[in-house]
Image: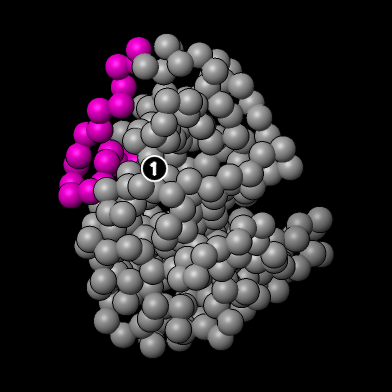
Amino acid sequence: MGLCKYCGEKAGLFRSKHKACEAKKIAGQTSIISEVEKFILEKESIENMQPTIQQIAAEHYIKTEELNALYGKGFDEAVAHILEDGVVSEEEETKIGKFKSQFNDFDNKIDTQDSILKVIKSLILRDLLNGSIPKSRVNFAGNAPFLLQKGEEFLWIFKNVAYHERVNKTVYVGRSQGVSVRIAKGIYYRTSSFKGNPVLTNELKYISEGILAFTNKHVWFSSDLKSFKIPYSKLITVEPFENGCGLLKDGASAKPQIFSNIDGWFTYNLVSNMVSMV
Ligand SMILES: [Zn+2]
């Protein structure tokens, strides 16, 4: 006679679980994720979150070591909700901070890398909307291949970026796109409508793969074959793509420089706002 791996009672010949016990556990997981989301977004006393969650876990055969993943999922849900309207408000930032403060070593224990990066992007855009150069919220892990000036700080870094140049200038100039639609002060397009933007095609000449970084002063690119920096003040066109961004410097010989495998929406908003501020 097998025993149920959840409740420990007899489960029947060749059986390791009761279906009802398994269903109860799954319901408990769903409930924990939505409770975590509510504690972040709605409830005042975040201090009650962990006791509440532990109680749900105990009643639904969920082990303590399974909880961090569920806290992470609840956080992801809350962040997705927060970002629906575009930018993280100060109040929402405080809520996120309070949630994080409930854990020792949050960054290593709770897997929310993706959501945290989305929040940081949103905070950068919030600074720009408020008319200020964004604070630095990212560090370069390892040795940065860029020699920053005094007072120059990283705003954002993309790795494994494909760099292309557009050789045929007439194709670029003849395109009708390039007019930006403002949906709020300084933010162009919502993430969802941005998905309709052109995707980069192979009319471009691929040059190399490297690191693309944005500082408070320059756009930097570093790769084996080609490295350069461009001050924002030299940029005359910022072209949005769903999966990339095109930049054109002033100067008669300047060729469009196109980066792909990046978040086109964020990059376009970051660069076009930085251009208008420097
Ligand atoms: Zn059972």
Q: Which residues are magenta?
A: 174-192
Would residue 59 appear left or right of 9 to someone viewing this image?
A: left
Q: Give, as a three-letter code, the residue at label 1.
A: Lys
Residue 204 image offset from top left, x and y in percent: 56, 20
Is residue 235 in sight in this rendering?
yes
Residue most extreme to the front: 252
Q: Position of residue 275 (x, y in %)?
A: 32, 47
Residue 120 falls in which quadrant of the image? bottom left
Question: Mark 1 Cα within 10 Å, few/some/many (few <14, many 20+)?
Answer: some
At a point 56% along the width and 68% down the height, the residue shown is 139
Is 179 included in the stretch rendered in magenta?
yes
Is 222 located above or below residue 96 in the figure?
Answer: above
Q: Position of residue 168 (x, y in %)?
A: 50, 14
Residue at 60 percent of width and 61 percent of height: 147
In this view of the protein, can residue 126 be seen by the observer? no
Q: Nearer the viewer, residue 22 or 64?
A: 64
Viewed as shown, does residue 235 lie left or right of 9? left
Q: Position of residue 2 (x, y in %)?
A: 79, 64
Name the residue tied to disc 1: 234
- Taking the image as shown, residue 265 lies to the left or right of residue 86, namely right
Where does the N terminus fall, quadrant-wise? bottom right
Depicted 198 relative to depicted 37: above or below: above
Position of residue 140 relative to residue 269, above or below, is below
Identify the residue at image location x=38%, y=40%: 235
Residue 19's place in the image compared with 257, above or below, is below
In what quadrant of the picture does the C terminus appear? Answer: bottom left
Observer-nearest residue: 67 or 169? 169
Would you say 94 lies left or right of 163 here? left
The residue under the point 38% across, 27% down is: 197
Q: Secondary structure at mark 1?
A: helix
